[in-house]
Amino acid sequence: MDSSLGGYFPGDVFPYHYKYEHMSVTADCAIFTFDGKALKVLLIKRGMEPYKGCWALPGGFLQADEDAEQGALRELAEETGLVPTRIKQLGCFSKPGRDPRERVITVAFYALARGAEVRGGDDAAQAEWFSLENLPALAFDHAEILSQAREALRRDIHFEPVGFELLSESFRMSDLQRLYEAILDRKFDRRNFQKKILSLGILHEVTPDEDASLTVASHEARDWDSMPSPDMPSTCMEEDENPDSMMFDSYFSFPGHGPKADRKAFGEALSGNSAVFDEELSSTFNLARPLPKTWSTSAKTYRFNPDAYARMKQKGEKEEF
C-alpha cells in the first residue's frame, strides 16, 4: 500500500461518507523579480476557461500525492519553466464564489527570483514579466493575492535580508538601494541608507584580489561626498536644493548650472553606470570640465555575507533592516 497517498488508491471506495461537500484545493504563486529599476511580477495568460485569454498568477489544482508547496512549485514549472530556490506561504484564500467552476480554496505563495526567461506551458498560453506599475486586469481574486504578497514582501524586508538573490554576486550600494526603494515604494537618503545597511554587519566589501574585474580605479572610486567642488556662492543654489546638489552644479557650464532636465539625466547616468567617465560623457552632458578619469560611479563593491547573518540570528539579535 502506498503510504504517500495515505493508503488510498485512485478508484477505491471510501469507507466513510460525509454530508459535507468536498472542495477543491489549488496553489497560486506571486513571483517577483527586479530588473535594476523596477519590481516585476510573473503572470500567465490562461489558455482555458474560465477567464480564457486573461492574465493570472501561475497556479493550479493540487494532486492527491503532493502538499501545497509541492503543487505550487510543480504548477509554476509547468506553466512558466521557472524553478525558484524557495517560496514562502502567504495564506489561504477561501471566499465563496472566487472561482466560477466550483468551491475552490487556494493556498498562495510568494517569492523573489531572478528575472529568467519564461515561456508558457501546460494550460498557460503565455508567460511574461509585468511591471507592477503597468498590470493588466487579473483573473479570479489574483489582484487581492498579489496585493497581499506585496505587503508581505515589504514586511519581510524589515526583518531579514530580502532580495540579495536578485543582485549579482558583487553589487554596489546604489544597486541595493534601488532594490529596497522598489520593494518599499519609497526613496531613501543615500548616506543614511548606506550607514544603516553597513551597521548591520552582513555585507563584505570586495577587494580587487577577490574579484579580478575590479580595477584599482573602480575600487578606489570616489562618491560625490569626496569630489572636489570649486567655491560657489549660495546664490547659485535654488530654494528646493541642498548643498549636495552643488556637486552636480559645479560641472555645468553656465550660471544657473544647466537645465533641470540635463542635471536629472546626468544623475541617472551616475547612478546607473559603473564605467569610468571620460571626456565624451562630459561633452554629452555639457559639463564645464571633464570628470577625472579615475572617477567612476561604482564606488565600493559588496557581497552579502550569509555567515555573518547566521551569527546575528544565532545570537538572537533582531535588528530591523
Image (tube, rainbow, N blue to C red):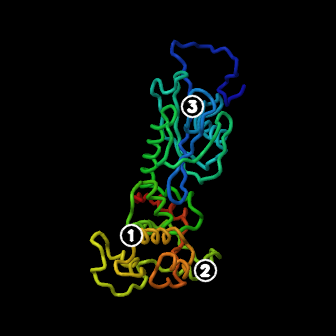
Disc 1 vs disc 3: which is toward the camera? 1
Q: Nearer the viewer, residue 115 or 24?
A: 115
The amino acid at mark 3 is Thr
Work out whether 245 lies above or below 143. Answer: below
What residue appears at the point 49 percent right and 72 percent down from the top-left corner? 270
- Location of residue 313 with respect to 301 vertically, above or below: above
Q: Position of residue 282 (x, y in %)?
A: 50, 79
Residue 307, label in figure: none
Instruction: Give, as a three-letter code, the residue at label 2.
Output: Thr
Q: Do tag 2 and tag 1 residues touch (Cβ < 8 Å)? A: no
User: Which quadrant would the C terminus be assigned to in this image?
Assistant: bottom left
Residue 204: x %, y % from top left: 53, 70
**The residue positioned farthest toward the right in the image shown:** 1
| SS under mark 2 | loop
Q: Residue at label 2?
A: 215
- Which quadrant of the structure image shows residue 195? bottom left
Which of the two labelled residues, at mark 1 and mark 3, occupies the earlier sequence position?
3
**Residue at the disc numbered 3:** 26
Q: Residue at x 62, y 13 (%)?
A: 15
Q: Are marks 1 and 3 in contact (CB under 8 Å)?
A: no
Residues 308 and 263: in front is 263
Give above or below for 50 relative to 245. Answer: above
Q: Please rate how many residues cluster around mark 2, counting C-alpha atoms within 10 Å: few if below 14, some from 14 to 19, many from 20.
A: few
Lower position in the chain sequence, tag 2 or tag 3: 3
Distance Cα–Cα, label 2 vs label 3:
51 Å
Q: How many marks?
A: 3
What's under tag 1, amino acid-wise?
Answer: Lys
Are circles 2 and 3 on residues that touch, CB within 8 Å? no
